[in-house]
Structures are given as structure tokens and as C-alpha cells.
Amino acid sequence: MHPAPSAPRPAGDGVRLARAGLCRLVEPTDPTAMLLLAALGPVAALEIAAGRRAIRAAEHTVLVRAGAEAGYGPRQIDLRRALERWAGRAAGLDPAADLAAAARAGAWFAVPEDPDWPEALADLGLFQPIGLWGRGRRGLLRFPAGRAVAVVGSRDCSGYGRGITLDLAGALASRGWTVVSGGAYGIDQAAHTAALAAGTGAPPTVSVMACGIDRLYPGGNEKLLRGVEAAGLLLSEASPGCTPSRYRFLQRNRIIAALSAGTVVVEARWRSGAQNTAHHADGLSRPVGAVPGSVLAGTSAGCHRLVREGSAVLVTDVDEVLELLQPLGTAAAATDPADAAGGPAAVVDGLSQPDRVLLDALPLSARSRPDRLVRVAGLSVREVLGGLRRLEERGLAEESEEGWRRRR
Amino acid sequence: MHPAPSAPRPAGDGVRLARAGLCRLVEPTDPTAMLLLAALGPVAALEIAAGRRAIRAAEHTVLVRAGAEAGYGPRQIDLRRALERWAGRAAGLDPAADLAAAARAGAWFAVPEDPDWPEALADLGLFQPIGLWGRGRRGLLRFPAGRAVAVVGSRDCSGYGRGITLDLAGALASRGWTVVSGGAYGIDQAAHTAALAAGTGAPPTVSVMACGIDRLYPGGNEKLLRGVEAAGLLLSEASPGCTPSRYRFLQRNRIIAALSAGTVVVEARWRSGAQNTAHHADGLSRPVGAVPGSVLAGTSAGCHRLVREGSAVLVTDVDEVLELLQPLGTAAAATDPADAAGGPAAVVDGLSQPDRVLLDALPLSARSRPDRLVRVAGLSVREVLGGLRRLEERGLAEESEEGWRRRR
């Protein structure tokens, strides 16, 4: 167990070192590793994962229980096999050297125990990053995800996509939104560029990278990324020196989605990382927008696919993006949760923003079907279906043959 | 009164003349006129509407009752004011001359009492066309709406829209679909052109025009429209000599929607006739698809709007259009007309067209009252009441206290 500090002071060196070690040792979405961390805390988790000592019987019981709570059966938490997996990296593990390398690159290492850890990452649950390596003003780290928007898309974007991105990210940034993206060529590059030029938010832009924080990758973006560092933040969950792999890119996308109120995909091919970001956002009940384009251009095929599948709302300009991020009548709710569902704060406490919107869209006396709720609430099919079940579990919604309504 | 013919033979001259007169006299979506027609039949309706005689007390009662059944209050059926409205045209009314003018242009006039009247138009209910002036092979008139697709869009289309339309309409027509459109410049023109070139359906393409059938409007499409006439059908509900008005264009769109299994909007501006066609289709529970395009092009703004509003499904190619037209598992039903009424062909043999429509409108398990059947089937009160008795005699319908249903 790792009790959060009750006073806002940074995590202790032991915790930070242990998390730096785990960062290097395990993949950030390895369920066994993340359960070990969640169940036993970073120090014990690292000792066990690095093979410095065996897991104790009592610890194993806690681990299995934590797994069960997260939906993993005992056979899915195969610690013996995981230890074999980790052994290769465990040999040369030197978290102090990683922290020193980061410091040499002007970087710091933030951990969930720090008071300025971005709150929104908790929505990733078990798969919250082990820690975040960062460059830029540390004081900006706790930027509000509620005022941040992910603008993502293909690396091999078209001139059309680049132009749209410059317009959209510029308009969002000039209205105080933090533009989050991935620092890559193409759409990401245009998004950061426009946000740096127009941005008034704090920070104007954040780049969540897939490589080590000591590298400015890709090389052609070095100057841009230095600009992001100066005005905003560069973040990565990869240890210093890490080179970007496809796997890292895909995992990184969940952080981009979690740090933002919503995600806009400007261009994406049929299969693409941007699609993956959108699905992460959808899974986090964050709204997703997709910009349409020519049906003849492969660069828009992924956007059209997201809209057809109901995973994204079609957006064509900044107003429609803002509507997506702050659905009608919920702009106030973002600042006053008590008003959102027309009841005491207790009712909606702990509800995600989309679930609040859904609750708001549910009729009190008539009945509404999910397809209608999708339209009325401006949520995806997935959000509505998932949200209805969550609201039902809390006794806030009820279903009949005619459809759904709110329970008083 | 106009008893439906029990054998499939054309309507009598009196009915045809009366409907031709009404076509000229009233607007096709004038509720008072259409209620008069539904309640009293075409001959009496024309006599009264043209001011040749006063409405009788008993007829007025039937009219008000028909209005109430269709949801119109007595004050909404202001016959006195309607007669003032119609008086201007009534003076020079000469339906025989209209029929002669049509004949000179090689056109015919089909009426709902004809056995080849397109069944699908009944879905327009009260606002089924009074009659249809047509050119081309009359034998094609009863083409199945279940194998027809409306392809519509802006007159001032882009090169992009034109290219997409040529591809899409060509692909649909080559698979045997009848492409229905409006004969205008732009998207309509491309749709007809591609269907004529590639079409294998019977007919390959149908143009529903907003002007009189004796005109080939717009002039630049004359050659194309002659091609449509030769291979397919030109249809119009406007009397010969009529010039197209904006109002006519918008009303015409309901016919395009009704004659098709679904509508694809290739390009449409924010406010456009194509949007109007899509909304007609949506109102008729016909699926609507919209092709996306550049967000910078005003020519796609209406398509994006339809998708955002939930009125249309985003479609990018012919496969997605076919998926829209034939949802999973229903493809077979559309090709076998015997299945349409849920029974073997023999069951409906010898039934008049209105009685077939009525049989189709009868629920299998629930019960339906005559007033509801009037709305659902788009038949007159008299047709419904007479038809129910005829169906009952044949053992096809049964009555209980709760209403009528189909007997298996």
C-alpha cells in the first residue's frame, strides 16, 4: 500500500526511485506489473519485480485479490512467467542513473504521489502511468484536463489536413485551451505549431512523446519540441534513452486521451495511431470528434470510419469542437457540478462528464431510447450504452420496454 | 365516388379527367384539397374545388371527419378560403386540354386508381401525388422502390461531387438499382448520366421533374432527359406547361424520396433542396446517406450537417450505400415481391391496388383502427372501410373490438 501524502509535498526519494526503476523494468500496460504496483506499492513492487526478493504469502494474497477486483483471474496473473520476462532488464537496472540522465537533459520525474500529478490520469485506472518524465515548467504539470483538447492525426497528412489542423488548433489555443498532441510529424506537428503561435492557455501545448525524454524525436521536429518545452510541457512515460517502438506509440496514446477533455482526429488512415487515440478517448468516456474529408483520400478514411462506427462525432470547425467538449447546457456544469443533474452534488459526484451529460439528457417522465440519447446528448453509442448501465447501477436511471428515463 | 376496380384495368376517363383537373387547380400539399380528394374521391372533389357546385351537408360531414382522422381540426379545413384560393385557376380549367397537350408531348397521365400506380407512393399518405404525368415506357412505371435509390445533391456541385456521383450512381445502376433523381444540373445530371451509361435496372434511371412534363428543363439537360425518356422514365406531378418554382422543387422532392428505398446526398449546401429530399426520406423512414467532403467546401456543408444531426449516415462508397439500403439480413425480402405482403402471390391476386396497400398496412399481431389505417395506408376513409370488408370476405382481415388485423 502506498498512502498518498496528506500534505502537498513531493513524494519521497524511495518512492521516486522505485517508480523510476519500474518505468525501466516493465511495460506500462503489463497487467501483472501494474497489479503488483497497485497492490503492494512501488517499493515492494520493484523489489519483487526486479527479483531482489520473493513475494511473501500475504503479499500474494493481496495481489490476487487486487487482480480479482480488476477483473483478472488468478491464471492471468502469472508472476513466475512475468519475473522471467523482467529478468533481462532487471540485471542492469539503475534508476538513480536514469534520474541523473534525465536531470542532465533538463528533465524531471513526476510520480502519482506528487501533489502536482495530473488528476485526470487517474481515469486510466490500473494503467495510469508509473511516472512521467517531463521537460518544461514543472509548475504547469497540473494543467486542467477539462481545458485541454487532444488534436491528433496521421504523420503523413495531406495539405488539407495540415491546413485544417493549423486553423483548428490555433483557434482552440487562442481561446485558452491547452492543445495536447504527440509531437510527431504531420497533424501533431501542425497542432503544436499553431498552439505555440496562438496559445493563451497555461500551458498552450503539451507533447506526450513515445521516446525517452532526453531525446527530441523525430529529428525534424527538434526546434518545434524545444519551443513546446519553453512554453509548455514535454512528457513521456518512457525511461531516458528509450527509442520509440510501435507498441510505445500506441500505449502513449492513452495518456494523450486521458490528459484531455476530448480528442479531435483531423486525419487518420483506416488503421492508424490516431484511431487508437480516439478509441482510448472513447473508452475513457471522453468525447471524440473526427474531421471529414474527401472520400477519395486515404488520409480521411479513418475519420469517416470513426463517425460511421459511432465512435466519433463529425466536426467541421472550432465551434463544433467546442460544442463537443462542452455540450449544450453543461458549460456551467463543468464549474458547478451541483447544477449538472439538477440535484445535490452528491448525486453526480464521481460521475464522469459524459455520464453527467447523459443523466441530463434522460427524460423524467417520458422514455428515451439509446439511439435518441446519442443524438440528444451528443455522446457516442458506446458512451450512452455504458453510461446507462453505470447510471442504472447508481439508481439514477431505469429501463423499461419503452426505453430509459431518469429515476428521481 | 370511385369504387376501386376489382380487375387490374386502368382508371375510367372521368376519374382521370378529374385528377388532371385537380392537378392543375390545387397545390399537391394543400391539406384542404387533399382531404377533399381523400374523403369524396376525385370527381366530387373537382366539382366542389372548381366551384361547379356547393359541397353537400353530408359531404361536409365526411370531409370534417376525414380531417379529424388525419389530425386536422375544423378550423384548419377552411373550405371557403380554399375556394377563393382556387377560383383564379378554376376559371380556365380544361383538363381535357391538359391531357391533349401531354399526349402531343408523348406523355401519359397515371392516377392512383391505375393498376400500375407505384405502390411506394402510398407512403406519402394524404400527400400522395394527385396523379403523375410521365414520359418514357409506361410499362416501367411500377418499378420497385425497393430496388431504387435516390441520388441527389446540389446543382452547383464541385468537380469532387460530380466525380463521386458518377462513380456511385454508375456502380449502383450496374448492380441493377434504379437511380432516381431530379433532372437538374450538377449532382442530378451526373447521377442520371452514369445510370444511363451503366444501368441494368428496369428502368435504369427515373427523373422526377418539377416542371410540366412537356418541357425538358433545364435546357442544358435536354439531351440527357431525352436519354432518360428513351431508357427510363420522366415523371412530374405538375400540369403541362408549368414552370418550375422553388415551392414545386421542394414538393417534388417528397416524390423522389418516396419512390426510392433510400436517398444518398452527395453534395449539399447548408440550406439546399437535397437537404429537403433527405428530410422527406427521413420522414418516410427511408434511410439517408450523406457523402462527406472537405470542411472548407460549402458544397459539403449540408451533408456534414445531416450526419451531425443524425438525419443521415455517413457513406463513402457503394458498399456503404448498399449496406444502408439493404440492412443486414433483409436483402432477400426486397427481391421477392411475394414476400412484401407476407404471403404467397396468390393471396393478393385479384385485389385492387388500394386493397393491396390496405392489406400491407394491416398489422399482424396488434390491432389497428380504420382512422389509423387511413393515415398509414394513405387511402380514403371510404377505401379503407370498403377495403376492410372486401379483405374480410376473402379471409384476409379480421375485426375485433380493438380494431382490425391481418389474418394469416
Image (cartoon, coloured by chain):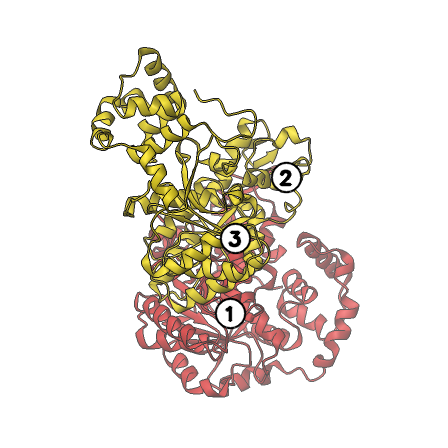
Chain colours: A yellow, B red
The chain identifier of the residue carrying mark 2 reads: A
Say if labels 1 and 2 share a chain: no
Q: Are marks 1 and 2 in contact (CB under 8 Å)?
A: no
**Image height of A140 relative to A320, above or below:** above
* Residue beneath the point at 57% across and 31% down: A350
Q: Residues within 10 Å of mark 1 (few under 14, many from 20)?
A: many
Q: Amino acid at mark 1?
A: Ala
Q: Which residue is mark 2?
A: A363
Horizontal placement of A107 versus B12: left or right?
Answer: left
Chain containing mark 3: B
Q: Which residue is labeled 1 in the image?
A: B268
Instruction: State the image coordinates of residue B279 (x, y, percent, origin top left).
Output: 55, 61
The quarter in which the N terminus of chain A is drawn is top left
Q: Is residue B46 left or right of residue B123?
A: right
CA gap between label 2 and label 3 equals 36 Å
From the viewer's side, name the closer residue of A114 and B16. Answer: A114
